[in-house]
């Protein structure tokens, strides 16, 4: 089931443009940031990439959030790359969801408060 398209304004090279954030999940531990960028640049312009390694109780999970330059390029990336195999893993590509609040040990906490190592990679100079 596809989510609604999260569109936002971003300033790139002094211009404001509509961008769309997509989620890339099920990345292999062998897959690097540059490899993800290379694959997704085939679908369009990547404004920003946040590559995340989450260490949880079941091990490590790698995923990324990519800000595509236009909603049309995000649509193309999802259509072409969702289900594609990269480094032995089937990619899950969809529109990014808003941060969800969860309950843990009786306390409400945001998903961003997990132990997450994130690095944002600027892709346009």
Image (cartoon, helix red, strand yellow):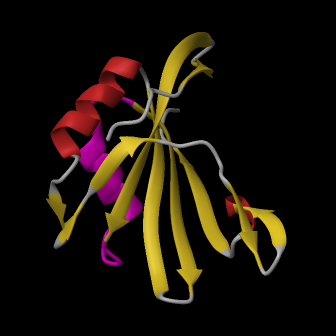
Q: Residue furthest top?
A: 15
The location of residue 100, given as percent across then percent down, is 65, 52
The location of residue 123, given as percent across then percent down, is 48, 40
* Apparent side of residue 19 relative to residue 83 in the rendered image (left or right): right
Residue 112 highlighted magenta (yes or no): no
Q: Residue sitting at 27 percent across and 48 percent down?
A: 38
* Apparent side of residue 104 relative to residue 35 in the rendered image (left or right): right
Residue 35 highlighted magenta (yes or no): yes
Q: Residue furthest right?
A: 107
Q: Residue sitting at 30 percent across and 27 percent down?
A: 75
The image shows residue 63, relative to residue 44, as above or below, that is below
Q: Residue sitting at 68 percent across and 76 percent down?
A: 115
Whether residue 97 is visible here, answered yes or no, is yes
Whether residue 42 is visible here, answered yes or no, is no
Q: Within the image, what quadrant is residue 118 found in?
A: bottom right
Q: Residue sitting at 32 percent across and 41 percent down?
A: 1
Q: Pick the residue in front: 100 or 84.
A: 100
How many numbered callouts? Answer: 0
The image shows residue 50, relative to residue 1, as above or below, that is below
The location of residue 27, given as percent across then percent down, is 33, 67
The location of residue 44, given as percent across then percent down, is 29, 29
Residue range in magenta is 28-45
């Amino acid at each position: 089931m596809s989510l609604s398209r999260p569109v936002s304004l971003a300033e790139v090279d002094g211009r404001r443009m509509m961008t769309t954030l997509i989620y890339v999940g099920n990345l292999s531990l062998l897959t690097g940031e540059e490899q993800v960028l290379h694959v997704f640049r085939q679908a369009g312009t990547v404004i920003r990439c946040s590559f995340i390694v989450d260490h949880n109780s079941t091990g490590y999970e790698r995923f990324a959030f990519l800000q595509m330059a236009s909603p049309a390029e995000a649509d193309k990336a999802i259509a072409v790359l969702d289900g594609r195999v990269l480094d032995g893993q089937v990619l899950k590509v969809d529109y990014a969801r808003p941060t969800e609040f969860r309950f843990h040990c009786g306390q409400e906490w945001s998903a961003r408060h997990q132990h997450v190592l994130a690095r944002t990679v600027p892709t346009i100079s």
